[in-house]
Amino acid sequence: MSAYELIRSSAADLAAKLAAKEVSSVEVVQAHLDRIADVDGGERGINAFLHVNTDEALAVAADVDARRAAGEQLHELAGVPIAVKDLIVTKGQPTTAGSKILEGWMSPYDATVVKKLRAARMPMLGKTNLDEFAMGSSTEHSAYGPTRNPWDLDRIPGGSGGGSAAAVAAFEAPLALGTDTGGSIRQPGAVTGTVGVKPTYGAVSRYGAIAMASSLDQIGPVSRTVLDSALLQEVIGGHDPFDSTSLTDPSTGLVAAARLGNVKGMKIGIIKELHGEGYQTGVENRFNESLELLRSAGAEIVEVSCPNFGYALGAYYLIMPSEASSNLAKFDGVRFGARTLPKDGPLTIERVMGATRAAGFGDEVKRRIILGTYALSAGYYDAYYGSAQKVRTLIQRDFAAAFAQVDVLISPTSPVTAFKLGEKLNDPLSMYLNDVATIPANMAGVPGLTLPGGLADEDGLPVGIQLLAPAREDARLYRVGAVLESLLESQWGGPILDKAPTLASTAATSGEVK
Amino acid sequence: MSTDATLSFEEAMEKFDPVLGFEVHVELNTATKMFSSAPNVFGDEPNTNVNEVDLGLPGVLPVVNKKAVESSILIGLALNCKIAESCTFARKQYFYPDTPKNFQTSQYEDPIAYDGWLDIELEDGTVFHVEIERAHMEEDAGKLTHKGGATGRIQGADFSLVDYNRAGVPLVEIVTKPIQGAGSRAPELAKAYVAAVREIVKNLGVSDAKMERGNVRCDANVSLRPYGREKFGTRTETKNVNSLRAVEHAVRYEIQRHAAVLDGGGTITQETRHWHEDTKSTTSGRPKSDADDYRYFPEPDLVPIVATREWVEELRATLPEPPAERRKRLQGDWGYSDLEFRDVVNAGVMDEIEETVAAGASAAAARKWWMGEIARRAKLADVDPVALGVTPAVVVELDALITSGKINDKLAREVLDGVLAGEGTPGEVVEKRGLAVVSDDGALQAAIDTALAAQPDLADKIRGGKIQAVGAIVGGVMKLTKGQADAGRVRELILATLGVEG
């Protein structure tokens, strides 16, 4: 197989070819490393990777090949490479969270999901770019430069997980790990024409994911196909004694659901509040098209109302910064990470902590720490954090009422397609509105999946379709998602990414090898 | 150090009515920490009993130690508290390097145990009913040592050392309701209350309960008000008073200091105070307002602790004999009079006597040592008898050496000197210092002959039947043998030498 074919293969296809010994893992990994070297660096490169893990990835691949040659029984995805969002800690590779404050820091321990990747013998290609501490919807808030959208290099790849989505969209990796606090897996998936899943809260261990908002954060799969995400979620999911909020459910039945291939008789609910006004016309058109396809496949489409979703964004921007202000307190330069000394004056502990945080955190992180500190302050707690928690309960009730009527819910993932780099950088409120459709799932802990719904008429950029299911019913997302994906792809004559522009090699302009 | 004026305690008591309140922190002796699998061990090399969770590294999550929850429920039950069916943890947020996450995981709105009480008996048998507001779970902070600078605090220090071995050690904080009506018994009550809590947690086996190691730490709140007024005065909180005697002294001192300030028309600053054992006084700590903003919020990384009634009842069934009942039983077993037993309890050596008896000494011998020589030395050194460093095993061995005639009481005191000087066990000290009594009759006979020759008149008197005069000769022999002779044997030999029937 050519390198071109290898990098465009799905994880499932690669797994099958590896099992059949048609290709070696070293060949697969090398093809992806070459692709990274070709398109990721340089001024007009994708910049999806903050660190490329060449030696270890090849060593793991060689080990898998040797074991396979020796006839050892291996995990289905053994030898299939993966990229890891740089919010997830890894031994042997730096973890920065996209922040200067962790520049050069090496974790002495592996996140639980990373341990699971190692147990499955999946070579890690490297660490992917993100908005600093996962705070943003464009990856422009990374301290290490923005990631570019492979569909249009002048546009954002979404965020915070723009690096993982762009890496998969640019064929630099077949799979990636993301984290989703308010849409950081799904919104990048939508604007890059890829698949991403935020599992049920607690379905995947958070141990080793640098916390932004503990009650909202969730690790999940990023891929180009629905089946690939199902395969990956089965690897990383399941109970973890190191995460008290982890569910005891086994991580099974997802791949089977993705392979089921029918939605006949399923009830699918359109959320009245999550389309229409404020949604780009092309997004609305592709959304309606997907509804038609599902209807034609035998699903019943009904409209449901979730009246409190209108308050979700406001409540989210109280709960998330409150928890973030607390979770980020540990970054003070005392025990790990960067330390900045005050320029003049005495070197007291308070002043060193202050100088470190002033220099180490970017504007968006500081904005959220200040918001959260304020919201938790005595005298304001009830009005802000307390009220937001009540809204959260109302949102959970809206979901409960909706799922009493339907099996899954459907909406556009993002109200707009990818915007231009820099376009919303000075308008945080407009930036926050990108997550209006994804935030309710985090507030209620329910799972959500995004898959490509086609290209918007007005700009030719990818549109994402979001499916939502009740908590612990992640399998429903994979069942409906795989059917819709297959209906759409037969309409398009192939995967949506076939329509993406060919990326020019930037290797010549890239001064350094990552 | 302290230049604060004080009134005499008696004058303070004439003018003011003291109100007390205590926060006692109990370190649990679980195998691992409150939220991590790192070992909970005292005294190891700094920063060795830590893992990524204790250090608050990026990405870590806490997991509650079930054993610590059980211990907390046991403490709550022993303090006659209600046990919450469901309770949560909260984050108490402040930036300080002894807390690796810059927040302490604690309980805030819903402690695991609440609404309890304890009857505290003072030395003369007076009983005070102390109400317990709550007992909640939290994690200990790391230990900071500030080097250089005048204050011993982080401000002005040249540098500070931090040991995170203690970070994450499970703590139960027991908070009383305001204690009113103690009057002049307030300092005694303070000591007795902390002693009772310490006794309870030790008896439960949930804490090593060594105050000198900080296993039990007391913050003592004191305020004064004019007699007859209902509203409390402004309080101060004296932190980390780490011995029973110090608790008593600190409360007494703060009462005297408050009284002087109020009597002079001044106002008390609401603040923490530091206790200084050397000067027996307190100095100003940091201002502590009721409006301190720790930005508490529910710990999102932990799910609620659910204590089912079945679980609570199972734990209740394992509660050991309550200390008050145990005291009654021990007094009966040992045959001590009320006065003797109360002295033992007040000296804080009941546990030691129990261990000493269990290790083979008679109850009389155990009391003789703990209330005699050990208590005397402790008083001289101004420490609690338990803190002197004498173990029950030492007492048992000393007693056995005396009983077997190897040493006498006088020599035993020298042996104890040697033990306390770190020269080894009593047996080793006897060996090294050559302290065994002279039982070689040949050596004794020589000394007797010398002593008799030195006082021929006395020898004649004894021969003449004045047997009571033998004591002077015995004294002479003891002098010659430097006290290393068995006085009884010497007496026998003198009489035999002089041919007199004893």
Image (cartoon, coloured by chain):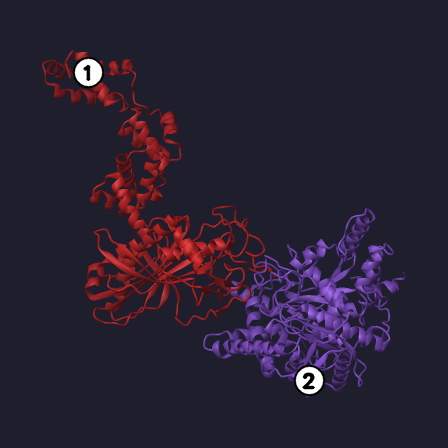
Chain colours: A purple, B red
Q: Return the residue at label 2.
A: A275
Q: Is residue B502 left or right of residue A114?
A: left
| Nearer to me, B86 or B189 | B86
Disc 1: CA contacts within 10 A as few (<14), some (14-19) or many (>=20): many
Residue A231 seen anywhere in this rendered image of the structure = yes
Q: Is residue B94 above or below residue B455?
A: below
Query: Hey, which residue is sitting farthest front in the picture?
Result: A265
* Disc nearest the viewer among 1 and 2: 2
Q: Return the residue at label 1.
A: B494
| Nearer to me, B139 or B301 | B301
Q: Position of residue A496 (x, y in %)?
A: 82, 75
Circles 1 and 2: CB distance less than 8 Å?
no
Q: Is residue A476 left or right of residue B41?
A: right
Amino acid type of the residue that numbered disc 2 sits on in the rendered structure: His
Q: Is residue A255 above or below residue B65?
A: below
Quadrant for residue A115, please give it: bottom right
Disc 2: CA contacts within 10 A as few (<14), some (14-19) or many (>=20): many
| Nearer to me, B142 or B125 | B125
Quadrant for residue B120, please give it: bottom left
Q: Position of residue A197 (x, y in %)?
A: 70, 69
Quadrant where the N terminus of chain B lies?
Answer: bottom left
Residue A49 seen anywhere in this rendered image of the structure = no
Q: Name the secondary structure under disc 1.
A: helix
